[in-house]
Amino acid sequence: MLVVGPNGVGKTNLLEALHVATQGFSPRTRQDAQLIRTGETAARVVVEGERGRSPIEISLTLRHGQAKEARLNGARLPSAESLRREVSTLVFTPDRLAVVKGAPAARRAYFDRALGRLFPARAAVPQDYLATLAQRNAALRRVQFGNSDTAALAPWTERIAELAAELVSWRRATLERLTPSFKERAGELGLPEARLGYDAEPPTVADLERRLSRDIERGTTGLGPHLDDVLIASGDRDLRQYGSQGEQRLAVLSLLLAEAELLPTPPLLLLDDVLSELDLGRRRILAARVATMGQTVITATHASALPVEPAQLVEIEPGLAESRSTT
Ligand SMILES: Nc1ncnc2c1ncn2[C@@H]1O[C@H](COP(=O)(O)OP(=O)(O)OP(=O)(O)O)[C@@H](O)[C@H]1O
Ligand SMILES: [Mg+2]
């Protein structure tokens, strides 16, 4: 589906609404208040569609100062975030370039979410590690302030070593799963020899004990997968530092396409402003590729940006989205 309209008319808003409705959160901001129209007290998005072959209806309601309310086929879900376990939506926005050029934290967050989608049974591994890390850090500060003795840290150190090993091995499994398709999709879009890498080893109990006095002094754990990074490279070139804007864009897009073809149920793909900076050849390849995938929504200012006829064309005017079926 191609969504077209002039700048500022609400194309990104529409994509954001689809993401909020299907995943429970915005890809742009964690401040839900921003999602409610200025001057209004509440917002609601309702989407109907199919998951696999069964019909599905999701509604998400936001009210100022209240928890979000998500309903799946009428039944209230325990939290809006639990939508993520029900349906997958992958989004490209120009902000997503941060996955390649941003700080390591952006990559960790991105690949940990991919881990959860590719290995749903392990989706909690990153959170478990971080929650335990927070507890170990609190214990370190208790020792720092003399409210507890060093021996009390041993169980936390052991637990962190265990969970770190688990997290690193699932992160590696995630990268291994993604790499072949990532390389293929990137190669086809003109980014040769694309690869992902994870160099760090999880710390052992002995490693953690060795830096215990420093950790106590700082009140935080200075070693472990919460500090690791994922390499994104094309041949010998590290795209994190040396990629051009266009190459970084291709890398993010290839990651998305790679994951989309690996997920058991084709995800909803939301591609915002992806066409504007791609040359015609790459736009053609991208259009051909997404045509083989699940449902894809692409935005552009003009219909001519997409070199093929979309299955559906939605024209946005202020306050109105009008759909024209083209097939
Ligand atoms: N909470 C809000 N309440 C009211 N208006 C808002 C709110 N959040 C954003 N807007 C406005 O919605 C308008 C539409 O923005 P949007 O980013 O969707 O446009 P767009 O069609 O994607 O434009 P572009 O082609 O420039 O990317 C903007 O003018 C923006 O300021
Ligand atoms: Mg926009």
Image (cartoon, rainbow, N blue to C red):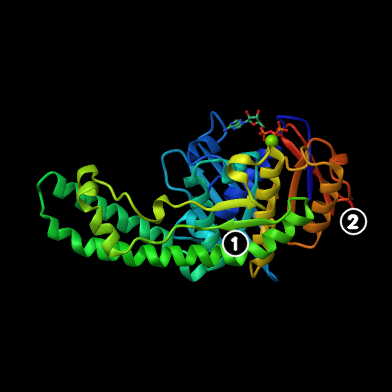
Residue type at mark 2: give it: Thr
Residue drawn at (52%, 39%) of the image: 29
Q: What residue appears at the point 73 percent right and 43 percent down from the top-left corner?
A: 274
Query: Which element type, helix, strand or loop, lies under badge 1?
Result: loop
Work out whether 122 lies above or below 186. below
Q: Is residue 292 left or right of residue 12?
A: right
**Which of the pair 32/116 is nearer the observer?**
116
Question: At label 1, which amino acid type do we have?
Answer: Val
Between 130 and 302, the residue placed more toward the observer is: 130
Tell me which corner region of the image, top left, top right, bottom left or bottom right, holds residue 38: top right
**Residue 54, position in %: x, y?**
67, 70
Residue 260 image offset from top left, x and y in percent: 67, 61
The answer to whether the residue bearing label 1 lies less than 8 angstroms from the nearest atom of ligand 1 is no
Left or right: residue 155 compared with residue 56: left
Quarter of the figure that contains the C terminus: bottom right
Question: Can residue 86 be seen from the camera position used here?
Answer: no
Mark 2 crowdedness (10 Å alpha carbons): few <14, some 14-19, many ≥20? few
Percent across and percent down for residue 51 are 66, 66
Q: Does residue 157 lie above or below 16 as drawn?
A: below
Circle 2 is placed at which residue position? 327
Are dots 1 and 2 in contact, CB under 8 Å? no
State the residue in front, 76 or 213: 213
Q: Is residue 268 above or below residue 271?
A: below
From mark 1 to mark 2, how far is it between C-alphas? 26 Å
- Residue visible at 83% across and 53% down? 285
Q: Residues within 10 Å of mark 1 (few under 14, many from 20)?
A: some
Q: Which mark is residue 87?
A: 1
Q: Quadrant of ligand 1?
A: top right
Give residue 17's quadrant in the image.
top right
> Percent position (x, y) of residue 264?
64, 70
The answer to whether residue 275 is visible is: yes
The foreground one among 137 and 306 is 137
